[in-house]
Amino acid sequence: MTLDRRRLADHAAGWGFAAPAVVLIGVFGLVPVVWSFVLSFQHTDLTSPGTFAGGANYAKLVADPLFWDAARRTLVYVALFVPVTLALALPIAVMLNQRIRGVVLYRLAVSVPLVTSTVATGIMFSWLANPQFGLVNAALDAVGLPKQGFFADPGQALFAVVAMTVWGWLGFAVIIYLAALQNVPKDLIEASSLDGCGRARSFWHVELPLVSPATGFLLVWLTINGLQLFDAVYVTTKGGPLRATTVLVYHLYNEAFVSFDGGYAAAIGCAVFVLIAAFTLLQLRFNRRSHYEVR
Amino acid sequence: MRRPSALHLVLLPLSAVMVTPLVWMILVSVSTQQESRRFPPGLPSGIEWENYLAAMRDAPLGSWLVNSFVVSAVCVAGNLLLCSLAGYAFARIRFLGGRVAFFLMLATLMVPFQIVMLPLLIMMRSLGLVDTLGALIAPNLATAFGVFLMRQFFTTLPRELEEAARIDGASRLRTLLQVLLPLMRPTLATLAVLTFLQTWNDFLWPLIVVQSPDTMTVQLGLQSFQGAHTTNWPKLMAATVLSQLPVLLVFFFAQRFFVRSVAAAGIK
């Protein structure tokens, strides 16, 4: 009797505590996922009730050259953004992990982009990369190179976006690596140096494997964020010039809020979702295989 | 044995590159129009405060900052309260459907926002919340990430802590508030920092759900200001500096704290 009553009290207490968050997340996080899937089978402008479209939106997706161009650009962007960020972040984190004078200031300088909003970053980089009087062109000019268009040049705009977002995410990646490096037990490094390992070798064989969980996390995190690239493009190039920076989510935005084809936008959204899920699962699998742990 | 390290040769230029955008933003913001359009660019000859006055005259920066602050503050408060309660329940109470609810909630972490935003817009429209701060607050009041973070925290605490209080007859809520709350501070701080950064810097959702200048957050407002003043760089930069000031100030005074929060969220 008392046991049953206590269990009942547990159910009530559990839901009493969890319900507000669960209901909010369910309504605003879970219901829209299903709804979005439904939308992708409708013709809708998102304002008036939609009509059933069958697979028309997905047929359009397969046949839409703009979609495939956007997908290709997104993959090019991710293939540059993620490795470049990681390749810069790890050596910087290793340097900032040394006990040298002024390291606090260096850390501050590197982590400043963390609190700089994408809009502010976009405005700053638009000026720095300005084709007429930007600072970057002044630097090129000083060493005798011709001025470049950067965001204004269809052949360079995507790379300018890569550079800008690497600046924006570098601090985050460095902090994650620093935290991982600081967790590497000092005696392991000492032991390896007693065994005759040089600094470089002990880094390669001891520290690098031990920070691989951080690498794995960053790989997933940066890829997911890279596949969802939108803000940085919106505030610098608006998808241009000549669609050179129209990535998947920008294409989605255009379809939903410029062409008012909500059903097709939802179908693009579902494609992005599948892409993200596939990448995440792939990387998680790979991670598990190359996972080291110290106890 | 501390000798000057050769690392400075790398770190000094690197730091310069990292802070150049910010430093140059400040320099342009106090330049005259002519100075901002010379090539090669140089240092301003004086300080042109007029840019700041003009920016404040033309952009309702005050109300944008207030909007951003209200949205962020309410979302931080909501997350701290609701995620703690739910995280505690999922970690400590065995209740009907609890595991299923937790699993479903975790699943939403995988979902990109672009999937959610189209139906969310339709929902906000039928709730009559479009173009209000409510539309910016409601979807961010409790987050799956926050519940997960708090649950992970509660599972690391020894059960004996609360059992003693429970045996003494304290209710669950009282135990949570009086026994566990003091221990939760670092985790709550992490959640607060991350929620604040996320809502303060959010752009896509405000872009599609807010139209009128009075309801804009500072990011959205700044972007609309950029669209309208592409030729007046000093004024645009002054507005950008003003928009970044609150967060930059907080960051400089609480840098360690920020960094620890970000690192904690990444590693857990």
Image (cartoon, coloured by chain):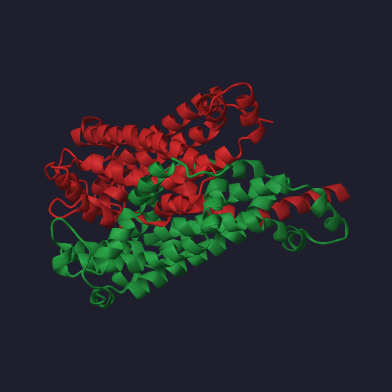
Chain colours: A red, B green
Near-viewer residue (B219 or B267):
B267
Quadrant the C terminus of chain A occupies: top right
| Residue A154, image x, y percentages | 15, 41
Quarter occupied by residue B206: bottom left
Tell me where residue B161 appears, x and y as whole percent: 81, 53
Q: In the image, B28: left or right of B78?
A: left
Is residue B111 at least partly visible in the picture? yes
> In this orientation, which residue lies closer to the viewer: B25 or B16?
B16
Q: Report the front residue among B22 and A272.
A: B22
Residue at 32% of width from left, 59% of height from top? B23
Is any part of residue A35 visible from this angle? no
Above-or-below relation of B218 to A50: below
B221 or A85, nearer to the observer:
A85
In the picture provided, is B58 more to the left or to the right than B66? left
Where on the picture, by quarter, is residue A68?
A: top left
List x then y, in percent, for residue A70: 24, 37
Q: Position of residue A64 (x, y in %)?
A: 20, 34
The quadrant holding residue B256 is: bottom right
Q: Is residue B141 positioned above or below A174 on the image?
A: below
Say which residue appears at 52% left-offset and 58% top-offset. B193
